[in-house]
């Protein structure tokens, strides 16, 4: 009995000795880049003014009545622009088709030298200026039918911006 | 008599002793929160295949290994000028063997956890977490070091 006890003690000691913990360490980095929030303001409506039945009317991005958004964000930050666009302007039960959307982005509040793009539900890449500014101009075409009902037609253009 | 008993025991012991280099741990992917917005808490799940942190470790089948993280409480702004709080929840770590039948095990990275490797001798450890930028957090890049220490038995 004494021998067994001694042997067990030896086994335990040996196992403990031979299975001595081997510790190893490895590192990774935890990374984050803090940006300031994006601000978006619709600063001007896309206004077609008076249109006539049967006569399509387009508003270009450089027009005084093009739609305009002002964005603020991280200086030089990349941003995706995604639009939710109406297919019709609505007046009661009457629809006025709208389409052929055009867009332009600029670091300043002017369309001179702006970067053209086609607004859509698919993200368009852009970037804030070094001062964290971005303007987006939007144009489109309405196509009144020959029997288009008279009235004030409206629709909503929504711009969503997200860093990438 | 005693030497006769000791010899086979020594041989047994030699047979089960991990060979140097046989047990390893390597960091293979940073925990990357990407762009976070001031004032908006951002979480990366440990199962995120792109942003979660990841380690690879190898030991011996049917042998225990203890995993112990050394986790930062803040990330430091690169170039100085601020810190960004970071935290890790009770379910922010996942260990899974590389064998097809290995079952992922979620555990708390804030406490040591010991596993016995039943289905495969090598395994991955994924780490998620969350950062909590203040509303007035200084913009810029932040980083901190996460260490995984494996104690191989």
Image (cartoon, rainbow, N blue to C red):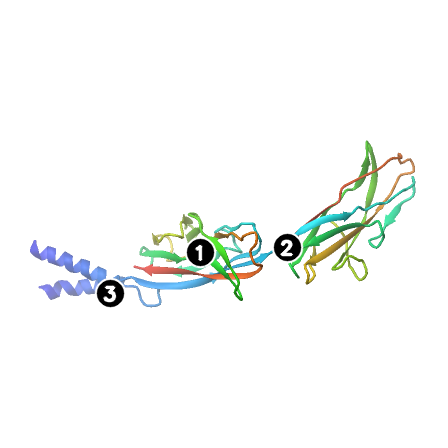
Q: Where B83 falls versus B42 (above or below)?
A: below
| Marks 1 and 2 on same chain | no
Instruction: Kindly report the distance in space between the C-alpha atoms of the residues bearing marks 1 and 2.
Output: 26 Å
Which of the image's four quarters has the C terminus of chain A? Answer: bottom right
Question: Answer yes or no: do the residues labelled 1 and 3 have beta carbons within 8 Å?
Answer: no
Residue bearing mark 3: B14
| Mark 1 surroundings within 10 Å by alpha-carbon count, few (fewer than 14), some (14 through 19), many (20 or more) | some
Q: Can you see residue B59?
A: no
Residue bearing mark 1: B73
Residue bearing mark 2: A163
Instruction: Kindly report the distance in space between the C-alpha atoms of the residues bearing marks 1 and 3.
Output: 42 Å
For this orientation, the residue located farthest to the left is: A2
Query: Is residue A26 found left or right of A98 in the rendered image?
Result: left
**Disc sitting over residue B54 in the figure:** none
Name the front one of labels 1 and 2. Answer: 1
| Marks 3 and 2 on same chain | no
């Amino acid at each position: 009995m004494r021998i067994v006890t001694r042997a067990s003690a030896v086994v335990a000691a040996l196992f403990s000795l031979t299975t001595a913990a081997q510790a190893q360490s490895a590192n990774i980095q935890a990374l984050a880049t803090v940006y300031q929030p994006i601000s978006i303001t619709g600063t001007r409506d896309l206004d077609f003014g008076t249109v006539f039945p049967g006569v399509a009317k387009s508003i270009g991005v450089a027009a005084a009545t093009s739609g305009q958004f002002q964005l603020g964000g991280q200086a030089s930050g990349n941003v995706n622009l995604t639009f939710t666009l109406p297919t019709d302007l609505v007046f009661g039960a009457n629809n006025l088709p709208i389409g052929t959307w055009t867009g332009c982005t600029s670091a300043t509040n002017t369309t001179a030298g702006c970067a053209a793009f086609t607004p859509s539900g698919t993200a368009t890449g852009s970037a804030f200026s070094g001062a964290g500014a971005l303007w987006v101009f939007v144009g489109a075409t309405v196509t009144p039918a020959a029997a288009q009902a008279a009235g004030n037609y409206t629709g909503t253009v929504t711009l969503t911006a997200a860093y990438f | 008599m005693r030497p006769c008993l000791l010899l086979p025991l020594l041989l047994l012991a030699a047979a089960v002793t991990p060979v140097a280099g046989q047990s390893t741990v390597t960091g293979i992917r940073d925990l990357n929160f990407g762009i976070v917005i001031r004032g908006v808490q951002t979480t990366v799940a440990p199962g995120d295949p792109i942003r979660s942190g990841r380690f690879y470790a190898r030991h011996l089948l049917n042998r225990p290994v203890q995993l112990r993280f050394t986790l930062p409480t803040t990330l430091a702004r690169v170039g100085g000028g601020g810190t960004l709080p970071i935290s890790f929840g009770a379910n922010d770590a996942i260990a899974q063997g590389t064998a097809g039948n290995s079952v992922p095990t979620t555990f708390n990275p804030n406490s040591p956890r010991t596993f016995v490797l039943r289905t495969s001798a090598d395994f991955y450890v994924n780490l998620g977490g969350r950062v909590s930028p203040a509303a007035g957090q200084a913009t810029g890049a932040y980083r901190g070091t996460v260490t995984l220490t494996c104690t191989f038995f």
